[in-house]
Amino acid sequence: MMFLPCLLLILSACVSATQYRIPRLSIIDRDSEALSLPLSDDFKTFYYDQTLDHFNYRSESYTTFAHRYIINFKYWGGANSSAPILAYLGVEGPLDKDLNVVGFLTDNAAQFGALLVYIEHRYYGKSIPFGSREVALKNASTLGYFNSAQAMADYADVLIHVKKTLHAKYSPVIVLGGSYGGMLAAWFRLKYPHMALGALASSAPILYFDDITPHNAYYSIATKDFREVSESCYETIRDSWSEIETIASKPDGLSILSKEFNSCSPLDNFFQLKDYLWTMYTTAAQYNRPPRYPVTRICDAIDGASSGSGIVGRIAAGVFAYKGNLSCYQIQPRDETETDVGWRWQRCSEMVMQLSTGNDTMFPAYNFELGSFIDYCNKLYGVSPRPHWVTTYYGGHDIKLILKRFGSNIIFSNGLKDPYSSGGVLSNLSDSLLALHTPNGSHCLDILRANETDPQWLVEQRETEINIIKGWISKYYADLGRLNNI
């Protein structure tokens, strides 16, 4: 039988990225400068012997692997005062990249006197079962332990271990996450209420499963983001796809396009450029944050291109403005990251988010076909996705009716410029299931490091979140005091 990673490469090369377009659920775009900042010495790395399979009692289930977690003790008030623990739940990538990016914890730890705990998601970074990434990703048998339920059980185990080791039995835990991690934070509070007093779920599209949210909602908001900046920019992008395809179909068309976009190497086909532009527009919309505001940057360049520029020239100007002044532009597909490989499995198993473009967007017509997606995943892994498992296991349907009857202490925060906000919780479900959203906010903006250029509405959003969390903790301490006086 062919080794699975090799098969993945072959099949991926044969399938255009536009066929199953599910934009990355990531806290920040991969080009962010914050990813390259040096880490503080306050972050201390630990490893826990994590159980491979939390939900079975076969002998192999008890196999363990080294599970990485990182602690910042700098601000903690200590176990004697039952000072709180703020726990960041890792997402689809190495934990290192999030430590500088997710500034909400370090920015606010002092006023909480909080211990900061960051826990890596299994199968990413250095938390790899079976001893190596090669073995862990070998086939569906080893990948079968790679899912959200196992990851959340991991988080619970680590938190129990940390509290026991530090004698912090009564320290309340607040979990926090963004994007996919935001979904995990909300679900963790619901599944492990005895472990987490509350959760901050930033940009968590927990309603983008089954048919709860219209399939075209993501791309409708992405289009709206561009259209609100400039109608002419929106029209240029909308009309550019057919123009680019027409040029690409000519005998020397790919050469013309390669030159127009200053590609680092010649384009092999039209889809490379199409995928590149598609990803650029969705990334710009999803992470349209201050002070850079990439949507505005792209549209200003498109609208400001020289009068002699055709549609393709104006689109190229948008690319150059977005990426900056480079000697050439890497239009061709980049090398896959571990996040690409891992998220493909997660998408092909349980995270089946069905996104289509619809006729009212600036993107080419694209309809997500579940049947062909199932076939694609079967060819890759020999297993079928479970498109309804997330709503079966975590819920989502009739959330306003159901969740308030058993859930509490969750903040669902969203920025309405974020296309994924369409799958978020945007109205309060109860007095403690709270929806905070900002009209100009973008993906996970509230949990990023505070910046002196942050607009006042963002400062106020974070202050509101902090005050809500303080209220949860104060009530917990009051209950704890009454219990101790009995």
Image (cartoon, rainbow, N blue to C red):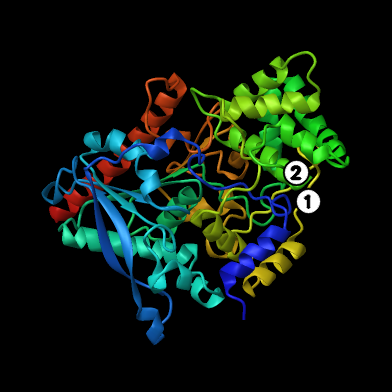
Q: Which residue is mark 2?
A: 357
What residue sits 72% from the left and 43% below the top?
Answer: 267
Q: Residues within 10 Å of mark 1 (few under 14, many from 20)?
A: some
Labelled pair 1, 2 in contact (Cβ < 8 Å): yes
Q: How many marks?
A: 2
- Establish if 179 lies above or below 56: above
The quadrant holding residue 241 is top right
What residue sits 22% from the left and 51% below the top?
Answer: 171
What residue sits 58% from the left and 36% below the top?
Answer: 286
Of mark 1 and mark 2, the one earlier in the sequence is 2
The secondary structure type at the circle numbered 2 is loop
What residue sits 40% from the left and 57% below the top?
Answer: 125
Task: Residue 387: tell me if it is visible.
Answer: no
Horizontal relation, residue 155 to residue 232: left or right = left
Image x and y of residue 45, in percent = 25, 54
Pick the front one: 418 or 28: 28
In the picture, the quarter occupied by the N terminus is bottom right
Q: Which residue is mark 1?
A: 367
- Establish if 144 lies above or below 22: below
The quadrant holding residue 126 is bottom left
Callout 1 amino acid:
Asn
In the picture, the quarter occupied by the C terminus is bottom left
